[in-house]
Image (cartoon, grey):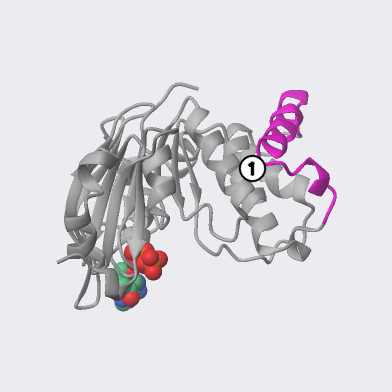
Amino acid sequence: MSATELHVEDVTLTAGAHHLVRDVSLNVRPGEVVGLVGPNGSGKSSLLRAVYRVLRPDAGCVRVDGTDAWSLPVRRLARTLAAVVQDAGADFDLTVREVVAMGRTPHKRLLDGDSAEDNRLVESALEAVDSVGLADRTFDRLSGGERQRVLIARALAQQPSLLALDEPTNHLDVRHQLEVLGVLRRLPATVLVALHDLNLAAYYCDRLYVLRDGEVAASGTPADVLTPRLLDEVYGVAAEVAVHPRTGAPQVTFLPEKARLA
Ligand SMILES: Nc1ncnc2c1ncn2[C@@H]1O[C@H](COP(=O)(O)OP(=O)(O)OP(=O)(O)O)[C@@H](O)[C@H]1O
């Protein structure tokens, strides 16, 4: 699995008269982990939907290794790109192992059974998200966080060279948040991930794009981007940002309104 390059070029997405995303460009270099951050409704999920081919751009283009993602056959794209979407429905009357094994589908021909290699990849994906113990459970009956881990395992089993994830840490307890982001960080793949937790984004991402009202408000390394001024402008909150002495990553401390520094 070699990493893929992603280019989002001047993408505009609309729903009726409403602009979801306007003229957004971003790139993720092979092997990079890039975070999409921004307030609620700023366009993160919409942009990711254009990357994993659910929302067709009204203008602009999504390129995967230079090729327009919308011109690729679906199966071919699925061998490259795995998506973890927000609040995926839980209407699978399947075991966890069967759900994760669905990740192998793009690599198989019609009527192919599971090979020993498929089974190995499924087990290893379950292990990566600490879910081996869930393998025989019914997916529908899992808790929100357990389901989220299984959907991440399904994406890992797909062995993608590009992952697009919408809030993958949603519902996860703190240990599983760290584990999942650690797994993504270590993959030999390119990762574009929407995150709300700015401290996790600062620690795990090489670069960040900040969206505001469907446009890119800032981009760069976490240290470049996560400044008190930007946090005030984009989120309307007062914050202090320090370099954490142990991790070396920027650490944001949000301040209650009364402590806002003029
Ligand atoms: N189908 C649609 N029709 C109209 N408006 C939409 C549609 N889908 C999304 N929107 C609006 O577009 C904007 C961007 O939504 P989007 O879900 O991309 O934001 P987000 O940054 O992912 O938000 P959150 O952090 O809350 O998940 C929001 O104002 C949302 O209400």
Instruction: Locate the C terminus and report the quarter of the image it occupies.
Output: bottom left
Q: What element carries label 1?
A: helix
Instruction: Identify the residue under disc 1.
Output: 153
Give, as a three-letter code, the residue at label 1.
Answer: Ala
Is residue 116 covered in magenta?
A: yes
Residue at image coords 66%, 63%: 144
Q: From the top left corner, tell me how far across and down residue 230 is, in percent.
A: 19, 56
Residue 25 visible from this viewpoint = no
Q: In the rendered view, does 73 fall on the left or right side of 108?
A: left
**Magenta portion: prevailing SS class:** helix
Residue at image coords 29%, 63%: 43
Is residue 71 covered in magenta?
A: no
In which quadrant of this rendering is ligand 1 seen?
bottom left
Viewer-proximal residue among 89 and 232? 232
Viewer-proximal residue among 144 and 251? 251
Q: From the top left corner, tell me how far across and down residue 67 is, in percent.
A: 28, 34
